[in-house]
Image (cartoon, rainbow, N blue to C red):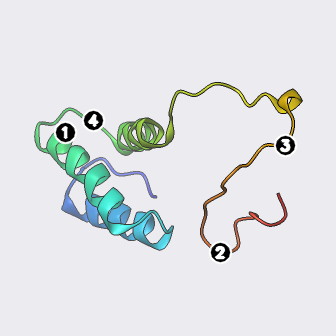
Amino acid sequence: MEERSDLDEDLVDELEALLVTSDIGIRTTERLLGDLRGELSRKELKDAAAVRERLREKVLEIVRFDRADIDWSRGPTVMMVVGVNGVGKTTT
């Protein structure tokens, strides 16, 4: 994403294209960009670096969850791994 001094709908469109082509999904992309659009319209984000940081924070809010560490000493453990093709599920 290039640096911009003006934050406009073109930036949001560019982010949308990047997120969708990164297999984040339409629903998640809309959720992330809906919040960003609001912050941009209120002039809360001053530059592209602030937009990137806020987007990073929003993604972490979605993927972060509280859970206990896996106790491997308890014996066999079943784990479900989810991901798009080519991300290394089988290799892992």
User: Which dot marks residue 85?
Assistant: 2
Q: Earlier along the polypeptide chain: callout 4 or callout 3?
A: 4
Q: 66 above or below 21?
A: above
The answer to whether residue 66 is left or right of residue 83 is left
Whether tag 1 and tag 2 are in contact, CB under 8 A, the answer is: no
Determine crowd level at label 1: few under 14, some 14-19, many 20+ residues with C-alpha closer than 10 A.
some
Give the camera-side residue of 9 and 57.
57
Identify residue for label 1.
39
Badge 4 amino acid? Lys
Q: Position of residue 31 (x, y in %)?
A: 27, 52
- View extreme (left): residue: 42
Q: Earlier along the polypeptide chain: callout 1 or callout 2?
A: 1
Label 4 to label 3, Cα distance in Å?
Answer: 51 Å
Q: Position of residue 3 (x, y in %)?
A: 42, 51
Determine crowd level at label 3: few under 14, some 14-19, many 20+ residues with C-alpha closer than 10 A.
few
Label 3 to label 2, Cα distance in Å?
Answer: 26 Å
Q: 81 above or below 52?
A: below
Identify residue for label 3.
76
Give the camera-side residue of 84 and 77.
77
Q: Earlier along the polypeptide chain: callout 1 or callout 4?
A: 1
Label 1 to label 2, Cα distance in Å?
Answer: 34 Å
Point out the frontmost of discs 1 and 4. Answer: 1
Residue found at x 19% / y 39%: 39
Q: Earlier along the polypeptide chain: callout 1 or callout 3?
A: 1
User: Which dot marks residue 46?
Assistant: 4
Badge 3 amino acid? Pro
Badge 1 amino acid? Glu
